[in-house]
Image (cartoon, rainbow, N blue to C red):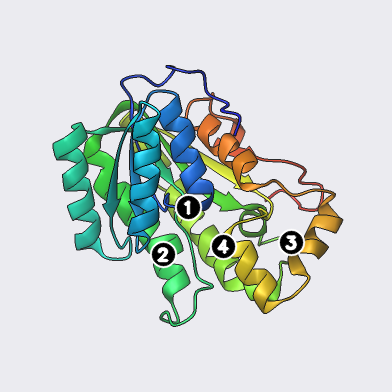
Amino acid sequence: MSNPLATGSLSGKRALVTGSSRGVGADTVQYLAEAGAKVVVNYRNKEKRALQLVSKIEEAGGTAMAIGADLTDKASVAEMLGHVQREFGGLDILVLNASGGMESGMAEDYALQLNRDAQVDVLTQTLPLLAPGSRVVFVTSHQAHFIRTTETMPEYLPVALSKRAGEDALRDLIPELAERGIDFVVVSGDMIEGTITATLLERSNPGAISARKEAAGRLYNVAEFAAEVASAAVDPIPADNTRLVGDVSDFRTV
């Protein structure tokens, strides 16, 4: 992985990346740690992977801790943030990366619970830990960001709608964040090769990802997209608080 952040550029900073035991979240948290940030690896049920990632970061000279939390459970989120407060004293970077909705065996409204309600709750509960100058990054997809004007795969529609609802709900908090001196940015990308979402989509609709890749010309891989997410934690805020990653010619601006 090629880190977009300079070594030591985040020394003294503290970061929490939700859903960071694997995929984009895992690579993002590694980029932040390599740049000097103390990091929290959050997971729901992949404790072994999270602990392995913490060990990898520590072996490279970084500081990390793994904290399990069900983001749809307010008490679980409060417990996680209490641990962060005790160990790190606060946060400078919050990356809202965790998402879902295609898993089997979950409640019918799980996508909305996780992708909208939990995102707002995590940010709201984290506010006391965020000092002026902090940054909040929300990770989404073009399929969700542009869902009002561009159709997506039927299998992904509930996720896309719920993630757009989450983005809208978070954007409603921008005035409050601005008053506190906290930056907010949305990072949106096309389907990412190698993620659990891509795997589940391919399983439910064989050929879906390869078809999307052919239409787009190329798709970012996990490490490439994570580099964009990590950069968004420090780069100047773009227009409309939105960082669009890659070609968006297949999508119409909302």
Write down the residue under mark 4.
Answer: 196
Write down the residue under mark 2.
Answer: 114
Res 8 quadrant in image? top left
Give the structural element (helix, strand or loop) at label 2.
helix
Of the numbered discs 3 and 4, the one sitting upstream in the chain is 3
Q: Residues within 10 Å of mark 1 (few under 14, many from 20)?
A: many
- Residue 17, percent from left and from top: 40, 44
- Please, what is the three-letter code of the amino acid marked with disc 3? Thr
Res 74 quadrant in image? bottom left
- Please, what is the three-letter code of the amino acid marked with disc 4? Ile
Between disc 1 and disc 3, the foreground one is 1
Q: Is residue 165 left or right of residue 58?
A: right
- Give the Cα distance between marks 4 and 1: 9 Å
- Residue 50, percent from left and from top: 36, 51
Q: Residues within 10 Å of mark 3 (few under 14, many from 20)?
A: some
Give the structural element (helix, strand or loop) at label 4.
helix
- Give the Cα distance between marks 1 and 3: 29 Å
Give the structural element (helix, strand or loop) at label 1.
loop
Of the numbered discs 1 and 2, the one sitting upstream in the chain is 1
Q: Nearer the viewer, residue 232 or 202?
A: 202
Between disc 3 and disc 4, the foreground one is 4
Of the numbered discs 4 and 1, the one sitting upstream in the chain is 1
Residue 251 vertical position relative to residue 3 in the rendered view, above or below: below
- Give the Cα distance between marks 4 and 2: 16 Å
- Residue 245, percent from left and from top: 67, 40
Q: Residues within 10 Å of mark 2 (few under 14, many from 20)?
A: many
Instruction: Say whether marks 3 and 4 touch (CB < 8 Å).
Output: no
Q: Nearer the viewer, residue 225 or 162?
A: 225
Which disc is residue 150 wearing? Answer: 3
Instruction: Say whether marks 4 and 1 touch (CB < 8 Å).
Output: yes
Of the numbered discs 1 and 3, the one sitting upstream in the chain is 1
